[in-house]
Image (cartoon, coloured by chain):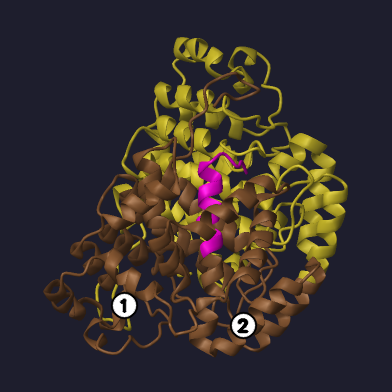
Chain colours: A brown, B yellow
Amino acid sequence: MTDARTGRARRRRGPAANAELALLLEVAGTPKPGNVDRARDLADLRFEQFLAGAVGARPGLARAAASDAVGDAFETAVAGMSEQSGGNTQFGCLLLLTPLVRAAAADDRALSPDGVSAVCESTTVDDAAGFYRAFEHVDVAVTDPPEGMDALDVRRGADAVPELRERGLTLFDMLHESAAPIDNRGTPGDANAHEWVEGFPRTFRAADAIRADDGPVSDRAARAFLDLLAEAEDTLVRTQHGPEVAREVCDRAASIESVEEADAWGDELVERGINPGTTADVTAAALFVALERGVAV
Amino acid sequence: MTDARTGRARRRRGPAANAELALLLEVAGTPKPGNVDRARDLADLRFEQFLAGAVGARPGLARAAASDAVGDAFETAVAGMSEQSGGNTQFGCLLLLTPLVRAAAADDRALSPDGVSAVCESTTVDDAAGFYRAFEHVDVAVTDPPEGMDALDVRRGADAVPELRERGLTLFDMLHESAAPIDNRGTPGDANAHEWVEGFPRTFRAADAIRADDGPVSDRAARAFLDLLAEAEDTLVRTQHGPEVAREVCDRAASIESVEEADAWGDELVERGINPGTTADVTAAALFVALERGVAV
């Protein structure tokens, strides 16, 4: 890239820096109904804690960019993210960003669904162990494990690792399990796990939308968030409030037609304690892909 | 540091990460009348460009933390900061942060006026050359050089380096020159240069105020900014609008008694194109010292 003014070659922000910037642009985008953003703190979670979470995650993201193992890079990112007093700010974002950063670093001309799928599918039992250890750094809202999987409850953290090794499960296997439909009507499982096992379809679609959009990138992020929220039920909302509320939030998002309406709805969601955090995770991942593909701040 | 919940040792954010976080907390703090902040973009300079500037500066800050030469670390930080479309976002902040980071990394029990003075006073002609090269990455608002100093105008960038070597001037020498009173009434010179040559007195005082304050750290930053603005004329305001306006801004800052009043004054300053950027630089430096001394986000 050449600077228009000086004519000198400009360095390009690397994938770890772009991933950190994606975390910052995600939380800056407003309005993102129900979530912390540039214009809103929650009672127990503040904007500045997301800033610290993003800064703290950088060394782990740099490990992913250096092609370190996905599980180790992820655990390092989560450990660094946790060095603030708000608790879990960006665990889900980092779960999506880690393989994306590794894929981008491996071939910077072609961060693609195939490239990131190759990274995800090649994860090992050690990567799964890193994923479990990451849960020791921070409290993450999760549902109870399926029948017969108690020994692999992520809330057991490192205590689950022997069982994991016994069964020979990789990180991809774990997330494949989490992505499976949760009922016989085909209701999808964890939305982040779904991205992992399906080549990040929503992430890449939202990245395209961000690239095609115009104006400040954080404004585009807010619009992408609302579109994603209207497209599929938010996993965190379902975990914390049940399927009816998740469905309601999804439908309502689809009906929002103005920033003012989104703002007002945000007040209502905050009042009810509804926080569509999984949709924010996918938004951050989409911002990363958009930055890697040339969207400029 | 031990985590209260898990009882496990927690890693401590290093000086480069704390410096980047200081840049983010500075721009997040609102209201900071006349400047970009969490609640305000300017027409040609947006919040998200400061986010990108902070992320881009990290590798240079990491060089300072690794005890690389101050001039090289500063130039690297400025080059990375410039990789966004807003132009100069944090040049002055980085000029203050670079020696502070280096001092903090050298002795993390005692980031002190003496420690940072030792760093500044030991700068070399090569460091001054790095400082000049940094001006090639971004347009910085500066005044004309004093008589007989044309050949050393910072706007000459690397072209001034031979003259610099000829005269054997170190970076400390350069900033000592810039800090000198600009008239025979003792009106101080560049406020950032003054910090450099005097052991960062305003920075350390403001850091103490931030530590003694309570509430969210970005709110403390906004209060520290207003106190600093009331304490001394802002160099950037004087450069862009002259000494009368700089005096007026300083006096008015001292009279502000509420957030609402600060907000309204901010509207007026933006209308008049008055941007107290040098005071924001000292605020960022103070935030860094406060974070290094244990203020938690």
Identified by mark 2, the residue type is Arg
In magenta stretch: residue B139: no
Q: Is residue A34 above or below residue B293?
A: below
Return the residue nearer the eye: B143 or A212. A212
Magenta range is: A282-297
**Camera-nearest label, 1 or 2:** 2
Task: Return the chain for callout 1.
Answer: B
Q: Badge 1 local density, few (<14 within 10 Å), some, or many (20+)? A: few
Q: Which residue corresponds to the image point at 64% horizontal and 89% vertical from the top-left?
A: A272
Q: Vertical placement of B213 versus B285: above or below? A: below
Q: Are marks 1 and 2 on the same chain?
A: no
The reply to whether discs 1 and 2 touch (Cβ–Cβ < 8 Å) is: no
Q: Residue at x 30, y 79 (%)?
A: A154
Q: Position of residue A73 (x, y in %)?
A: 30, 57
Subunit that carries the residue with mark 2: A
Is residue B23 in sight in this rendering?
no
Q: Judge by depth and name the residue closer to the eye, B139 or B144.
A: B139
Q: Residue at x 66, y 84 (%)?
A: A248
On the question of residue A151 being in view, the answer is yes
Instruction: Give the residue pinned by disc 2.
Output: A247
- Label 1 to label 2: alpha-carbon separation: 38 Å
Which mark, residue A262? none
At mark 1, the secondary structure is: loop
Q: Main secondary structure of the magenta part?
A: helix
Q: Quadrant of the N terminus of chain B?
A: bottom left
The disc label shown at residue B3, or none: 1
